[in-house]
C-alpha cells in the first residue's frame, strides 16, 4: 500500500509539472498572438500563399496549353468550377477557392486570405493590347497616395490617373506600338518617373558580332517561362533581369531618366554635380534637370535603396525593392529597344567640359542621332517632349526611357570580382568583404569573374610594388595587359542578356603607348605610338566596348554627352567606382511578394 501511495504522489507531481508546462506554452502562444508574431499562423499563411501562387501558375499554364492546342481560339472565360477540375489532385482548397471565367477567386470568410489571393492573381495577369499579349504593369503594393499612371496626348501634354483606375485600363500603354507603360512616384516632393519592362525571353540570331540586328522578343506570362501567346520559346533565353535573388518577377520598373537629386543645382569646383558625394539627399527621376554625379558607386546604391524610406520617392512599403540599376537590367532595356518594340535612341549631348561649369541635363537630344557635346544654351538642344527630343528615348517617342545614350556615363551595380582595393574603397561597405561582394548581397550586383591568371594575383592591385601587370617595358606590359583583359572578356560569354559579349566580338585593353608620351590609353595592338591615338573596340551600332580592365573593376554604360557615335545603349566601359563629374546612375524598382 505504501508503494502504491508513493506512485500516486509521483503521478500527481508529474501531472502538476505537465500542467505548469501547458500553462506556460499557452501563455507564450497568447503573447505571440498579441504581438502578431504567431509562428504557427505565420507558417499557415506562408503555406497558403505558396499554394495559391502555385495553383494560379498552373491555371495559367493550363490556359496557355489549351490556347496552343486550339490555334489561339481557346476562350479562357469558359474556365469555371472547382480548382481540382483544372489542377488534378489539389482538392484541399475546393471549399474556399473556385474558378470564375478563368480567374482564381476566393470564396471563404478569412479577409487576410482574400487579400492574399487578390494580390497573387492581380500581380501576374496578362493583357492583350493591339493584338499583343504581355504582363500588365505591376502596380501591386505601390502606395496609391503617392503613385500615378502617366500618359501623353498627341502634343506630348502629360496627364495622370489613379493606379486603382489604371490597373483596369489599358489606354496608357501599347507595346505593339512602342508605347511603354509609365508611372511616377512622388513622396515629400521627391518625384520619380518609371517605365515598365515586362518579363520576356529573347533570341539573337547572330550573337558575338559587331553587326546589329533586330532582337527577337517573346513576352512571358506572369512569372512563368511560358510565352504569353502560347507559342514555343525553344531557342530563346529567359532574360535573367527578371530573376531577383530567389524571386521571379513579372517585370521591372526602370527609371525613365538618369537620377537627379533633391538638390540638383549643387555645384563644386568641378562644376554642377547635381548632388555630389553624399547620402543625405533623396533621388529624383525627372527631365530637364542636372543629373546627380560626383558620387561614389557605393553611395549610388545607398541612395537608390533609400527611395523606399520615409522621405524617399516611393515611401515605405512592403514587397517593394529599389536599388541601383544592375548591368543585367540595363541589358533588358537595351535588348527591348533593339527589338521591334523599341528604337535605337539618339544621344543626349547636353554638356560641356568648361571648368567649373560641367552641366549635364536629363532628357535631351541634339539635331542628329550621334551628336557630340552641346553647351548649355545651344539652339540645337531639344527637350524630351519636343519633335527631336523624343528621339532620345528607347521608343523614339515620349513613352520610352531617356539618357541611355550619351548624357552622363552611368555606373551600374556590377563588379569584376577580382579583389581589387577599389571595390572595398568605393562600393557600399556592408556589401563588401575582403574587396569582394558578399554572397548575401549578390542579388544587387552582377558579379563577373576574372581570368585564371588574374585570379592567381598576376594583375596589379595596389599602389606599391611591381607585379606581373606592371613589370618590364611598355610593350611587355601591354602583352600581359592584353592577355589578362582578353581572358576576362572571354568569361563574359557565360553571361546572357547583359549586352556585352553577345553584342560585340572583341575588346580593347588599357595599356601604355610604346613611344611618345607613354600615357595610358585603350589599345588593341601591343605596340602603339601615341601619335596614332587610341584604339576602341566596338559593339553593335559602333558603340564603344572598353571592358575587363583589372584595376577598374566597376562597369559604366551608355557613353557620355561628348561620345558621338561611340555612345549608345550598347556602349560599355570600366572605371574604379570613385566619384567623377561625368559619372551618374539610375535606379530600378522591383515589385514582388517576397521582396
Image: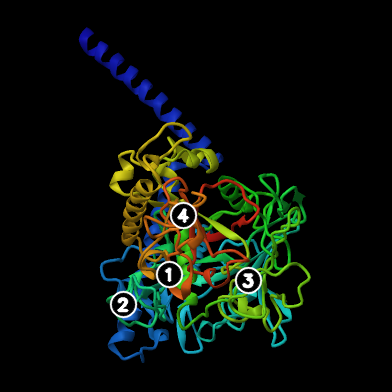
Residue beneath label 4, please? 594
Query: Residue 435: where, in percent of width, then height?
Result: 44, 38
- Judged from this view, the residue extending furthest toward the top is 2
The earlier-in-sequence mark between 1 and 3 is 3
Query: Residue 310: where, in percent of width, then height?
Result: 68, 49
Q: Residue at x 33, y 62 (%)?
A: 92
The earlier-in-sequence mark between 1 and 4 is 1
Viewport quadrant of the N terminus: top left
Query: Residue 77: where, in percent of width, then height?
Result: 42, 85
Residue beneath label 2, please? 233
The numbered disc on residue 539 is 1
What is the spatial separation of the Cα atoms under label 4 and label 2, in whole angstroms? 27 Å
Q: Above or below — where is 327 with respect to 301?
A: below
Q: Residue at x 31, y 77 (%)?
A: 233
Dot in front, 1 or 3: 3
Q: Above or below — where is 121 with respect to 525?
A: below
Amino acid at each position: 500500500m505504501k508503494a502504491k501511495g508513493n506512485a500516486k504522489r509521483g503521478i500527481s507531481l508529474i501531472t502538476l509539472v505537465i500542467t505548469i508546462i501547458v500553462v506556460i506554452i499557452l501563455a507564450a502562444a497568447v503573447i505571440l498572438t498579441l504581438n502578431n508574431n504567431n509562428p504557427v499562423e505565420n507558417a499557415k499563411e506562408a503555406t497558403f500563399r505558396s499554394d495559391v501562387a502555385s495553383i494560379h501558375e498552373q491555371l495559367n499554364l493550363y490556359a496557355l496549353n489549351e490556347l496552343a492546342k486550339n490555334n489561339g481560339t481557346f476562350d479562357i472565360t469558359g474556365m469555371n468550377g472547382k480548382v481540382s477540375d483544372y489542377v488534378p489532385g489539389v482538392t484541399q482548397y475546393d471549399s474556399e477557392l473556385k474558378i470564375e471565367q478563368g480567374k482564381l477567386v476566393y470564396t471563404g470568410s478569412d479577409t487576410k486570405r482574400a487579400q492574399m489571393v487578390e494580390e497573387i492573381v492581380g500581380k501576374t495577369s496578362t493583357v492583350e493590347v493591339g493584338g499583343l499579349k504581355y504582363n500588365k504593369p505591376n502596380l501591386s503594393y505601390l502606395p496609391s497616395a503617392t503613385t500615378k499612371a502617366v500618359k501623353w496626348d498627341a502634343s506630348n501634354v502629360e496627364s495622370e490617373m489613379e493606379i486603382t483606375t489604371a490597373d483596369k485600363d489599358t489606354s496608357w500603354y501599347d507595346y505593339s506600338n512602342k508605347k511603354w507603360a509609365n508611372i511616377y512616384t512622388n513622396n515629400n516632393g521627391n518625384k520619380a518617373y518609371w517605365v515598365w519592362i515586362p518579363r520576356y525571353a529573347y533570341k539573337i540570331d547572330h550573337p558575338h558580332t559587331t553587326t546589329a540586328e533586330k532582337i527577337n522578343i517573346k513576352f512571358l506570362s506572369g512569372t512563368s517561362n511560358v510565352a504569353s501567346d502560347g507559342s514555343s520559346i525553344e531557342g530563346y533565353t529567359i532574360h535573367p533581369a527578371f530573376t531577383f535573388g530567389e524571386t521571379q518577377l513579372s517585370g521591372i520598373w526602370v527609371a525613365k531618366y538618369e537620377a537627379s537629386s533633391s538638390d540638383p543645382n549643387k555645384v563644386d569646383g568641378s562644376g554642377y554635380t547635381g548632388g555630389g558625394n553624399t547620402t543625405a539627399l533623396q533621388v529624383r527621376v525627372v527631365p530637364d534637370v542636372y543629373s546627380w554625379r560626383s558620387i561614389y558607386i557605393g553611395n549610388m546604391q545607398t541612395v537608390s535603396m533609400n527611395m523606399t524610406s520615409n522621405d524617399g520617392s516611393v515611401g515605405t512599403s512592403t514587397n517593394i525593392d529599389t536599388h541601383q540599376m544592375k548591368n543585367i537590367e540595363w541589358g533588358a532595356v537595351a535588348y527591348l529597344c533593339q527589338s521591334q518594340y523599341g528604337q535605337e535612341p539618339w544621344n543626349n549631348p547636353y554638356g560641356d567640359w568648361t571648368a567649373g561649369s560641367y552641366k549635364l541635363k536629363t532628357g535631351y537630344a541634339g539635331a542628329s542621332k550621334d551628336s557630340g557635346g552641346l553647351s548649355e544654351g545651344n539652339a540645337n538642344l531639344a527637350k524630351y517632349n519636343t519633335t527631336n527630343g523624343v528621339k532620345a528615348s528607347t521608343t523614339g517617342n515620349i513613352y520610352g526611357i531617356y539618357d541611355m545614350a550619351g548624357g552622363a556615363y552611368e555606373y551600374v551595380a556590377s563588379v569584376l570580382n577580382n579583389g581589387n582595393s577599389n571595390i572595398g574603397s568605393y562600393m557600399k561597405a556592408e556589401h563588401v568583404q575582403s574587396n569582394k561582394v558578399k554572397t548575401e548581397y549578390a542579388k544587387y550586383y552582377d558579379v563577373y569573374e576574372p581570368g585564371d591568371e588574374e585570379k592567381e594575383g598576376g594583375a596589379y592591385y595596389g599602389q606599391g610594388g611591381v607585379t606581373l601587370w606592371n613589370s618590364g617595358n611598355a610593350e611587355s606590359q601591354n602583352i600581359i595587359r592584353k592577355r589578362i583583359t582578353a581572358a576576362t572578356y572571354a568569361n563574359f560569354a557565360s553571361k546572357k542578356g547583359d549586352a556585352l559579349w553577345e553584342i560585340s566580338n572583341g575588346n580593347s585593353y588599357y595599356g601604355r603607348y610604346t613611344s611618345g608620351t607613354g600615357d595610358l590609353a585603350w589599345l588593341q595592338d601591343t605596340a602603339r605610338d601615341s601619335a596614332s591615338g587610341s584604339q576602341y573596340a566596338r559593339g553593335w551600332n559602333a558603340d564603344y566596348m572598353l571592358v575587363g580592365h583589372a584595376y577598374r573593376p566597376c562597369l559604366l554604360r551608355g557613353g557620355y554627352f561628348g561620345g558621338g557615335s561611340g555612345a549608345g545603349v550598347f556602349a560599355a566601359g570600366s572605371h574604379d567606382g570613385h566619384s567623377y563629374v561625368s559619372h551618374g546612375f539610375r535606379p530600378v524598382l522591383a515589385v514582388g511578394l517576397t521582396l
